[in-house]
Amino acid sequence: MTYRTRFDQELEELKISLIKMGDLVTKHIHASLKYFLEMNSELAEKLIKKDEEVNEMEYAIERECMRIILREQPVAKDLRLITSILKMITDLERIGDHAVDIAKLTVFMEKNEEAFTVKETKNMVDISEDMIKLALESFVNQDLSIARKVVEMDDLVDQDFYTIKNQVAQAIRESDIDADYAIYLMMVAKYLERIGDHAVNLAEWVIFSILGKHIED
Amino acid sequence: MSENVFKINNLNLYYGQFQALKNISLQLKKNKVTALIGPSGCGKSTFLRSLNRMNDLIDDCHIDGDILYHQNNIYQRGYDVITLRTKVGMVFQKPNPFPMSIYDNVVYGPRCQGIKNKKKLDDLVEESLKKAALWEEVKDRLKDSALDLSGGQQQRLCIARAIAMEPEVILMDEPTSALDPIATLKIEDLINELKENYAIVIVTHSMQQAARISDETAFFLMGEIIEYGSTDTIFSNPKEKQTEDYITGRFG
């Protein structure tokens, strides 16, 4: 016979909420890059407003975690699970913020420029999406090997970042790119690189929730 | 919005000259667990016992104010206390099964009420023990002495005995303080299930337990209710400093 069925159910619901939040922020980063590449400031503006949804989800999960800590007084793996969720929602919220950062750059851009480094930036978003999804999947299944894989995937994001940096530098040297656009593009690349880092953080919290200790450097 | 089962207005209770409860006003709702917390001697058990007139047994105890059970004042002259106690059952701190078989414990009350039909009594035993999450553990030894059960099982038997009377309210006075952590969890899970059908009022010294199982919490101090509200609010953001000090272990 198992006890605390209500508690187990609450934990399951919390995991589902976390996955929904992950889904939402990945949608936002896809959209923000798309609007940047298409220079669609109108849709970028709308996306900025949608960030409120991400914040609401963060608060809702935070409230639920606090309620569970109060109600169920979790210990051992349950305590680590709740603690990890509280940290993971901060990373997810930051990812959402970076989607907003990119959208704001789109709004700031005054002129249309031909999209540059499309393949690499898109690739960065695709890999980040995979990382976020896999990190959350590894959390739900408490799967250490997948979490570790996510940590390694960050190298791919970093590679794209350096490729973009080199291509932009080359274009600047050849006076082949608008100066403002070059700066904005590098900022976008940096935000995408930071999104990869936050996805790594997610995986590291998964590892903590399983092992009870932080990943060794 | 849950229906009020008990409505208490300006209740004062005295043991001789000593005033044990001061101006208590509170509503107890159906399908809710209400926890009464506070330091020893604060009046929470006295209050609990006043709800089914257990304090009548104490000679120099007298009260003023109203305790309305479905709009009727249970302290009014001529009120049927026997019926009240069938509707408002009680479970005590120490399991107190009668020294008889498990079966006879459960049917003790119904038999007193004149139910003799064996089939009916058998059904009642099964139903009550199932509701008290004890049936699977004892169904093959219903004729064994209740005193041979473990402490946790005895307490669930006492709950089954209360349920057999088909009450509406179950009062629990520190029902798990004599039990180990696993037996405590079983009772807490049970309380969570029981609230589907009953109003439950529980006195507990464990604030963690109050936080785990109750919907509403009343904090008693020196015979007064300092704060009463939703358990989530009381334990996460209480309004009164005295409540905060007590639940955070700063005094008491």
Image: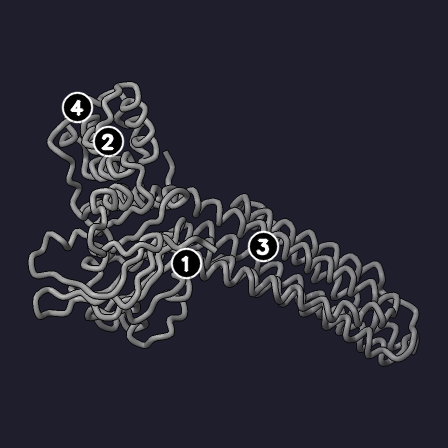
Name the residue beneath numbered marker 2: B110
Amino acid type, mark 3: Leu
The mark lying in front, picked from 4 and 2, is: 2
Q: Quadrant of residue B183?
A: top left
Model colouring: one colour
Instruction: Answer above or below: position of B21 versus B77.
Output: below
Q: Is circle 3 on the same chain as circle 2?
A: no
Let me know if marks 1 and 2 both belong to one chain.
no
Give the CA distance from mark 4 to mark 3: 51 Å
Q: Which residue is mark 3?
A: A18
The number of numbered discs placed on residues in the rendered structure image is 4
Name the residue beneath numbered marker 4: B144
Q: Is residue A142 above or below residue B10?
A: above
Crowding at dot 4, Cα within 10 Å, few <14 / some 14-19 / many 20+, comes out as some
Asked if labels 3 and 4 touch by Cβ distance under 8 angstroms, the answer is no
Both labels 4 and 3 in a single chain: no
Q: Amino acid at mark 4?
A: Asp
Q: What's the CA distance linking mark 4 and mark 1?
A: 41 Å
* Residue found 59% across the figure and 51% down from its top: A136
Residue pointed to by mark 1: A69
Q: Are marks 4 and 2 on the same chain?
A: yes
The image shows residue A154 at horizontal and vertical percentages of: 65, 58
User: Which residue type carries mark 1?
Assistant: Ile
Q: Chain of mark 1?
A: A
